[in-house]
Image: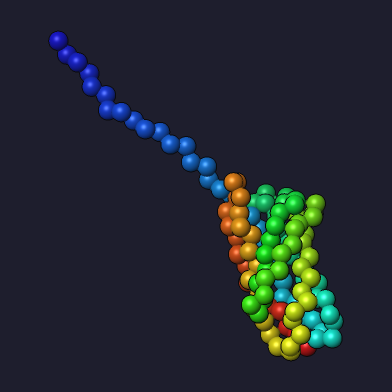
């Protein structure tokens, strides 16, 4: 009599997270402007706007937070940047259940 033996198989389902598009352009401001408004756009991998999503911006040791609107745009109101010079900003989206974390660097110039 012949017996068949099967090894036990485990199956795992992996969800591949999509990579969002985070765009931030270099911008210059005058030093005399008290509140500097800086705009960032966050879209899905299919180029659709990501609504009500939190994004952080770090510049010169300060962190600013903003939420995207229905068009995927968020505006950071930078108030603590008053010295002249060139600054590198780090804009970060922390990701979600379906999207990966995305980080972008951009230059800000204060004249």
The spot of residue 91 in percent (x, y) is 65, 67
The spot of residue 71 in percent (x, y) is 80, 54
Up-down: is 52 above or below 38?
above
Choose top left, top right, bottom left or bottom right for residue 92: bottom right
Q: Residue at x 80, y 51 (%)?
A: 70
Q: Residue at x 64, y 51 (%)?
A: 45
| Count of marks, rendered view | 0
Quarter of the image with the N terminus is top left
Q: Residue at x 70, y 88 (%)?
A: 85
Instruction: Using the image as rendered, state which of residue 109 and residue 46 is in the foreground.
Output: 109
**Residue that extends furthest to the left in the rendered view of this protein:** 1
Up-down: is 87 above or below 16?
below
Relative to 15, 104 lies left or right: right
Note whether residue 52 is visible.
yes
The spot of residue 38 in percent (x, y) is 77, 71
Relative to 23, 101 lies left or right: left
Quarter of the image with the C terminus is bottom right
Up-down: is 87 above or below 55?
below
Up-down: is 97 above or below 88?
above
The colouring scheme, among rainbow, by chain, secondary structure or one colour, is: rainbow
Note whether residue 23 is visible.
no
The spot of residue 29 in percent (x, y) is 80, 81
**Residue that extends furthest to the top in the rendered view of this protein:** 1
Q: Residue at x 74, y 88 (%)?
A: 83
């Amino acid at each position: 009599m012949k017996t068949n033996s099967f090894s036990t198989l485990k199956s795992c389902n992996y969800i591949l997270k999509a990579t969002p598009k985070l765009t931030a352009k270099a911008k210059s401001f005058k030093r005399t402007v008290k509140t500097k408004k800086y705009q960032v756009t966050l879209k899905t991998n299919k180029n659709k706007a990501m609504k009500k999503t939190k994004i952080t911006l770090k510049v010169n040791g300060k962190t600013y937070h903003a939420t995207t609107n229905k068009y995927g745009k968020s505006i950071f109101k930078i108030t603590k940047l008053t010295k002249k010079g060139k600054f590198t900003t780090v804009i970060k989206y922390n990701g979600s259940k379906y999207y990966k974390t995305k980080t972008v660097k951009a230059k800000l110039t204060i004249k």
